Image (cartoon, rainbow, N blue to C red):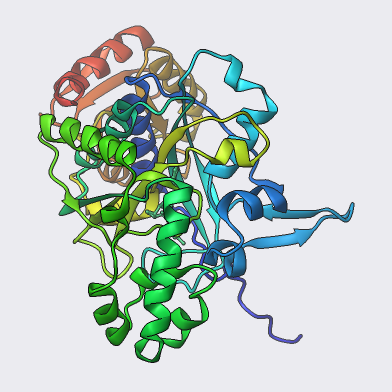
Amino acid sequence: MARQEKLRAPRGTFDVLPDEGRRRERLLATTAEVLGAAGYEPFDTPVFEDTEVFARGVGETTDIVQKEMFSFEDAGGRSVTLRPEATAAICRAYVEHGMHKLPQPVKLRSWGPFFRYEAPQSGRYRQFTQIDAEALGSDDATLDAELILLLSELLERLGVRAVRLRLSSLGTAATRREYSDELRQYLRDRADELSEDVRARIDRNPLRAFDSDHQATVRVMEEAPRLLDRLAPEDAEHLEAVRALLDDAGQAYELDPKLVRGLDYYTRTVFEFTSDALGAQSGVGGGGRYDALVEQLGGPPTPAVGWAAGVERMLLAAGDEAAAPGSAVFVAVPKPEGAREAFRVARALRAAGLQAQMEQSGRSVKGQLKHADRLGAGAVVIVGEDELEVKDMHSGHQRPAADVEEAVRLAGEALAPAVEARP
Ligand code: HAM
């Protein structure tokens, strides 16, 4: 028989093993708590959309639309795309469901898998997970500040290390158009110093030149005209209002006129959180205002603001946390005949709200106790032929129990210190 190639997860993707799965679950629970407290409601859109949603929403000239989308024709001949980001699809849903008729702002939170065909490296995958928060239907500066502070709080609660916040404003589309013309002229005048890539994009997307790491281009961009200096008075005021709220909250940030984001829909506020604990892919989360996007996708004029944060990058930047203290019960079965009773005991423990597992692999008694230890169990219920015993794994004490109810009670008591110690 011919040797078969080993099957592997596709390039740029990964499996989530249980240790990582637990961390992700905790991260999502914390997110729901932080965003839920500010009125952000759970919301979801499909994992794929008509390609047009992203082509029109994210922008035809962006890297995402030009080279990173997983697009294909379905069996019905429609062009569909695995979502590379959430915002355009959320706006599509806002329009589709007439959500402008709801009390505004509509505050939504979401999470799930996203897909971009990028060169994989640490912190950069072809399938990754984003948490997303959006507030649609108001241009109030408190929303910009609220969202920034919520992401900041979330990163802190998750233990993400060495976090920095950069903030800027891109003004309105009209300001940006005028500014882009000015920048184009400046870039053309110094075209021979620019990287090929940047030169090729002068007409389509001159702002991306600020993103370049080509040394000579970086030097040229140091002296380039700045959009921040060209903002219309009401946009400058909006930025000042956001800054004042961040200052009041004691939120540190750097005003960075060179901050450009990889999506075209932004207007006014843009921001990005990075972590110095990460390598080249240091962006843990970012976002901004997109006051024209809903209208662009066929809805009424609807100012909006939001962000997305990468789950994998946040966990990478959070490092390892200490294991939670033992709060589980293990049900040991010295003889196979005890399995039925042990099964009953495990179910009774769970019904009492405890976390319980039983022996299911035919180990010796010694092996079972070792396994209980490995699981971090705080108590072991030993189901003998005619008796039940409960071992407190912290003190090592072993006590007999008259029946299942008493075994459950004693196991609960043995866990009490660990359960109380949990935050
Ligand atoms: P984004 O900056 O493209 O924004 O992505 C947000 C976050 O997703 C990044 O900061 C990063 O943590 C994570 N991320 C992006 N690409 C990858 C990748 N290939 N592998 C791993 N993580 C990745 C948006 O997507 C906007 N929709 C944010 C937004 C919401 N703006 C307004 N509302």
Identify the residue at image location x=89%, y=52%: 76
- Camera sees residue 106: yes
- Of residue 411 and residue 57, the one placed in the foreground of this image is 57
The picture places residue 25, in percent across and down from the top left corner, at 39, 38
Q: For residue 386, what is the image quadrant?
A: top left
Q: How many marks?
A: 0
Query: Which residue is farthest right?
Result: 76
- Of residue 209 and residue 102, the one placed in the foreground of this image is 209
Left or right position of 420 against 108: left
Vertical order, 37 against 211 (above or below): above
- Camera sees residue 330: no
The picture places residue 250, in percent across and down from the top left corner, at 10, 35
Query: Which residue is farthest bottom?
Result: 192
Q: Quadrant of the C terminus?
A: top left
Vertical order, 115 against 308 (above or below): below
- Of residue 336 and residue 126, the one placed in the foreground of this image is 126
Identify the residue at image location x=27%, y=10%: 409
Left or right position of 107 against 247: right
Identify the residue at image location x=68%, y=36%: 298
The picture places residue 116, in percent across and down from the top left corner, at 55, 61
Vertical order, 10 against 392 (above or below): below
Q: Quadrant of the N terminus?
A: bottom right
Q: For residue 400, what is the image quadrant?
A: top left
Q: For residue 305, what is the image quadrant?
A: top left
Left or right position of 245 against 85: left
The picture places residue 286, in percent across and down from the top left corner, at 35, 49
